[in-house]
Amino acid sequence: MIKVDVIRKAYGDTPVLGRIAFEIERGETVAILGPSGIGKSTLLRLIAGIDDRYEGHIDRPEKMAIVFQEPTLLLWRSVLQNLTLIHPDLSEKAARAMLDKVGIGGKSNLFPGQLSLGQQRRLALARAFAGDPDFLIMDEPFVSLDPKTAEVMLSLTETLISEVRPATLFVTHARAEAERLKARILELRGAPAALAPRLVSEKERP
Amino acid sequence: MTDKGLVPALSLIGLLVLWIVAAALTADPTILPTPWSLAGPFLREVQSGELLFHLGHTLLRVIWAFVLAMAIGMALGLVMGRFPKVDRWLDPWLVVFLNLPALVLIVLCYLWIGLNETAAIIAVTLNKVPNVTTMIREGARSFDPDLDAMACVYRMAPMARLRHVLLPQLAPFIAAAARSGVAVIWKIVLVVEFLGRSSGIGFKIHLYFQLFDVRMVLVYALSFIMVMLIVEWSLLQPWERRVRRWRTA
């Protein structure tokens, strides 16, 4: 359902990504691992459709969601509006139910700035899943969290993924997080970055 | 009264005292009359309807020019801040217009369009658009790229994106442009009226300038300053408080 076939991506004359091809099925979680600076975020921006200057082709569904490292909320709109404005088809009732599910049910009329950072991240998760996405993209969502909070957020994410069952692309540099989400692991290596063959071969082979 | 209200009040009283002292030292009411000697002429002008008539005309021109300058300046600033290619093309124009003296634009508008209302309002608008554009462009350059990416991935509709993502980020810049806009525009409107209109505060000031009547010049100028203070307190400041609510909550 998601088909990535990037041939080349360069910034000016500097190639950043080489040939990268893989697919993600509905309900499947794929993790892209690699050291920082390798081009994980660049690849994610291509796959998300934020950046379309590359050679290659990417098939992606219409209904997508994204979770960034930072909560990236509309700080000037209420907690509830952060769901209903992003998803105009979402009823207020469904939005409130979603806030309940991530544990910030009583906060719907506050501004995001009045929430703790942990609660803001829960809101970002709620926003991602509220639209019932076919494709979920997560960009190091648990980096910079203390181990305890990271654990809580991981298990919340796990629950929501198992309920909504989107195709999930998870970018991280922490292998443990990827294993925890039972992700198929792809590793980016080299310059320009490409998938490490050893790890791809098992499942990609027809 | 709280400290917040007390300080501006005391500061204004200080200005008044300064005026009284200066008037006493001048000792010539044809050059600097005392504040209380303006009360009589002021009431006379109100009763005859003259003051309100000319205030109304000036205010209408200020509103027209303000709305036009803000709308055009915001659109231009947003486009120039978002698209560097457009910015490279239009930036030299902006520099030219920013450095064109108000008086030149006014005279040219009157010469080309004629001594009419359209020319007056266009002249004032053209004088203010470059400033608004510059300020809004600064705001558009400081947009959070992650919010852009978020709006893009979640497929937000263009109007929703403008209203809920872009304009709220621009709000402080819009407020600054509006604040300085109102102040500059009404001063230019007066010059425009002085040079080529037969109504408005600027026209009356022109008239009393020729009659060398300082008292009436002050009556008309101060009346309009009062109107602008009311606009500031009753419209601009409450609006600014409302859009800043999320910061202070």
Image (cartoon, coloured by chain):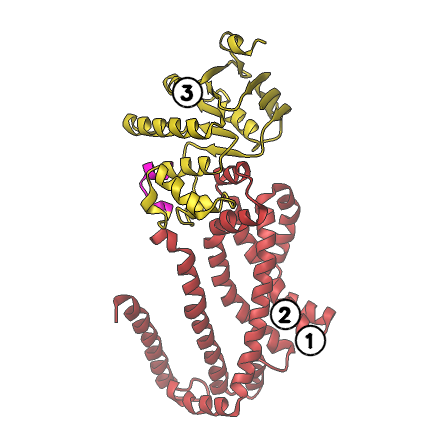
Q: Disc 1 sits on a residue from what chain?
A: B
Q: Position of residue B132 (x, y in %)?
A: 55, 57
Question: Magenta segment: does it hold A120?
Answer: yes
Give the residue at x 51% y 66%. B182
Range of residues picked out in magenta: A112-121
Observer-nearest of A144 and B196: A144
- In the rendered structure, find residue A138 and report the number of the disc placed on it: none
The residue that mark 2 highlights is: B121
Chain B drawn colour: red
Amino acid at circle 1: Asn
* Residue on which the image places disc 3: A173
Q: Earlier in the sequence, mark 1 or mark 2?
A: 1
Q: Amino acid at mark 3?
A: His
Disc 1 designates what residue? Answer: B116
Evaluate whether label 3 is on the same chain as label 2: no
Q: Position of residue B219 (x, y in %)?
A: 47, 84
Assign the C terminus of chain A to one quadrant of the image: top right
Count neighbours of disc 1 (C-alpha within 10 A) and say few if under 14, some if 14 to 19, many if 20 or more.
few
Task: Examine the residues drawn in magenta and state their main secondary structure.
Answer: helix
Q: Chain of mark 2?
A: B
Spatial separation of the CA atoms under disc 1 and disc 2:
9 Å
Q: CA distance from mark 3 to mark 2?
A: 60 Å
B155 relative to A203, above or below: below
Residue nearest the viewer, comparing B116 with B52 = B52
- Mark 3 vs mark 1: tell me if same chain: no
Q: Is residue A123 above or below residue A30?
A: below
Query: Badge 3 sits on which subunit?
Result: A
Residue A114 at least partly seen: no
